[in-house]
Image (cartoon, rainbow, N blue to C red):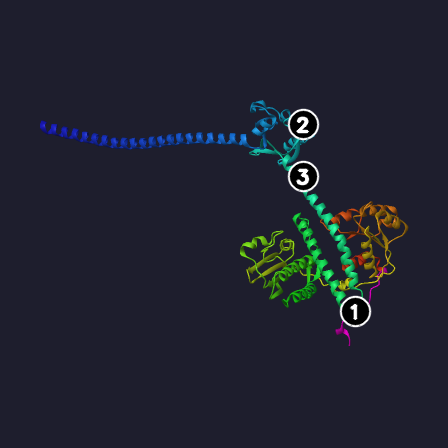
């Protein structure tokens, strides 16, 4: 019995021990899991610390680089840059300021007010400008631009600076101001030199224009008058040769002046309604003769849909077409020339094709450059300035169009001209009336010129309109004559010795009430850019360029003579209207 009891106790104790062992195993597993979690956490902490250390090292290196770059910028920046706090005290500056002031280091100016630092170097007026802009900057969030004068070396040499003041903000709060000063003295001097050179060039062109156009006025004017007289066939041919040669010389002169205007960006388009068909008819007639004289065939094609009335600058369109057609004639020794005009979409398209010498591939870049002539060996006999195509290219661009070409060396070239099409209004009757030569026998006209042959030409041209003008050989004589007689129109030469046309006009305007409004038309061989504006400023009403063209004189007289004095001839009736 006792043994059974002992066995039962042993079994109970053994079961209890097994339970404790199981409990210990479970706790050991739990502890093991916790240990693994702790290890993973410690590993993460270790990695974080290592990453932080690496980042710290990288930031230290980057900060060192940034500081190095900042020092490099402050040391080498050529402009004066000053960082000011909200009260105007110096926080930082470029070395350019220290070098300009000849101070050894930044500590000499650190923390000082900008007025204390700059007042001894800036001109008093410039200091006032800077102070005014700084005060404005405290309330206005914009960049302020201004100009100042300073003598940082205190040597008496004042230099010019372009200044900017910029307000610095951080999260909408004013955190300081940035002052930038750039020395523009040398730039201004170079600009003045360039302007002086340009002015000298313009003056040279004006003088040359006057000197060349003055005898051209006589040659072309006398040629025009003689062409209206009774001549035999040989005399007509000689006169035509004189007029054509004069026109060629005038084209060269105009090319030089046009290129100068384009180069100085003073070329302006004068847009108006014009008759494209009539223009092309005139070109066809002119180049038919030129081609015939050279033994070339001219093929002329105008599409049926080509509009008649165009709005644009007809003189520039004619100039481009004339120049390229003239080149085609000059550079085509045999064969023919083909001209085509059409409307393609919203563009007027002109195509000029020749069977001439063509253009080499390597020469095409030079083609639209000024003063360039290609293949001089082959073109020894061709005369020109080398400006024509350069001008044509720029004129096409000014008109919103383009000029291009296709060429095969030895076979010929084709030029393509594209100009935007703007529909014009028909003014057929008006144009016909303007071109008719009228009579104004009762008109009182005064012509002023110091060159006797110019007076003779002007007088002869005016007699075509039935006008017998009074003639004055100088400005002073013109003033006296205008005081004694009320003229309907005064034609006044610009460049005259003694009293020039501008001074004479001013005195005529002041002479009496009538002369305050009398039309004064400038006669000038000065056709450079700005001439028309100069005459308008001198109280002149209009401007006729020398050599004087009969059509231009016609329009001028129609414009300024009292309408009651103009006697129009009856309109001619075409043969198709006769029964």
What secondary structure is found at the residue carrying circle 1? Answer: loop
Which of the pair 190/135 is nearer the observer? 190
Q: CA distance from mark 2 to mark 1?
A: 80 Å
Q: Can you see residue 262?
A: yes
Residue bounds of the magenta highlight: 564-579
- In what quadrant of the picture does the C terminus appear? bottom right
Q: Residues within 10 Å of mark 1 (few under 14, many from 20)?
A: few
Q: Which residue is mark 1?
A: 572
Q: Residue at x 78, y 68 (%)?
A: 232
Q: Residues within 10 Å of mark 3 (few under 14, many from 20)?
A: few
Q: Which residue is mark 2?
A: 156
Q: Position of residue 288 (x, y in %)?
A: 67, 66
Which of the pair 154/28 is nearer the observer? 154
- Relative to residue 281, is residue 497 drawn left or right? right
- Relative to residue 299, is residue 522 drawn left or right? right
Q: CA distance from mark 2 to mark 3?
A: 21 Å
Q: Earlier in the sequence, mark 2 or mark 3?
A: 2
């Amino acid at each position: 019995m006792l043994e059974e009891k002992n066995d039962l106790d042993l079994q109970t104790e053994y079961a209890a021990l097994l339970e404790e062992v199981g409990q210990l195993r479970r706790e050991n597993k739990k502890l093991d899991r916790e240990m693994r979690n702790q290890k993973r956490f410690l590993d993460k902490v270790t990695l974080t610390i290592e990453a932080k250390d690496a980042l710290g090292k990288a930031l230290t290196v980057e900060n060192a680089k940034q500081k190095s770059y900042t020092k490099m910028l402050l040391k080498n920046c050529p402009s004066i840059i000053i960082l000011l706090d909200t009260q105007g005290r110096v926080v930082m500056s470029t070395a350019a300021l220290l070098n300009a002031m000849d101070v050894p280091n930044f500590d000499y100016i650190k923390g000082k007010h900008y007025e204390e630092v700059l007042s001894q170097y800036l001109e008093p007026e410039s200091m006032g400008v800077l102070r005014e802009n700084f005060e404005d900057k405290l309330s206005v969030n914009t960049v302020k631009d201004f100009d100042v004068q300073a003598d940082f070396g205190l040597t008496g040499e004042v230099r010019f600076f372009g200044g900017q003041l910029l307000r610095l903000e951080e999260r909408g709060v004013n955190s300081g101001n940035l002052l930038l000063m750039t020395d523009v003295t040398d730039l201004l001097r170079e600009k003045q030199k360039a302007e002086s050179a340009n002015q000298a060039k313009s003056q040279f062109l004006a003088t040359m224009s006057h000197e060349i156009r003055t005898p051209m006025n006589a040659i072309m004017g006398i040629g025009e008058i003689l062409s209206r007289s009774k001549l035999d066939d040989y005399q007509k041919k000689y006169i035509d040769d004189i007029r054509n040669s004069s026109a060629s010389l005038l084209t060269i002169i105009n090319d030089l002046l046009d290129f100068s205007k384009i180069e100085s960006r003073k070329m302006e388009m004068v847009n108006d309604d014009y008759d494209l068909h009539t223009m092309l008819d005139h070109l066809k007639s002119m180049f038919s003769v030129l081609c015939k004289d050279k033994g070339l065939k001219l093929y002329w094609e105008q599409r049926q849909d080509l509009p008649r009335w165009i709005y644009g600058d007809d003189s520039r369109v004619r100039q481009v077409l004339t120049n390229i057609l003239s080149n085609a004639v000059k550079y085509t020794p045999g064969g023919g020339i083909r001209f085509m005009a059409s409307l393609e979409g919203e563009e007027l398209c002109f195509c000029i094709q020749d069977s001439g010498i063509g253009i080499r591939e390597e020469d095409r870049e030079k083609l639209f450059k000024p003063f360039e002539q290609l293949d001089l060996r082959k073109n020894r006999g061709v005369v020109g300035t080398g400006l024509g195509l350069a001008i044509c290219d720029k004129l096409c661009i000014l008109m919103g169009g383009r000029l291009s070409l296709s060429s095969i060396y030895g076979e010929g070239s084709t030029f393509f001209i594209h100009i935007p099409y703007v529909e014009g209004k028909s003014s057929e009757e008006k144009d016909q009336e303007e071109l008719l030569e009228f009579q104004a026998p009762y008109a009182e006209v005064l012509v002023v010129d110091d060159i006797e042959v110019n007076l003779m030409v002007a007088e002869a041209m005016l007699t075509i309109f039935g006008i017998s003008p009074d003639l004055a050989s100088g400005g002073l004589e013109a003033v006296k004559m205008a005081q004694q007689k009320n003229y309907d129109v005064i034609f006044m030469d610009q460049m005259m010795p003694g009293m020039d046309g501008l001074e004479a006009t001013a005195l005529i305007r002041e002479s009496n009430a009538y002369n305050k409004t009398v039309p004064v038309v400038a006669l000038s061989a000065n056709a450079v850019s700005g001439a028309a504006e100069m005459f308008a400023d001198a109280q002149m009403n209009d401007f006729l360029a020398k050599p004087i063209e009969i059509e231009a004189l016609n329009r001028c007289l129609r414009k300024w003579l009292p309408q009651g004095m103009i006697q129009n001839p009856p309109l001619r009736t075409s043969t198709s209207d006769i029964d």
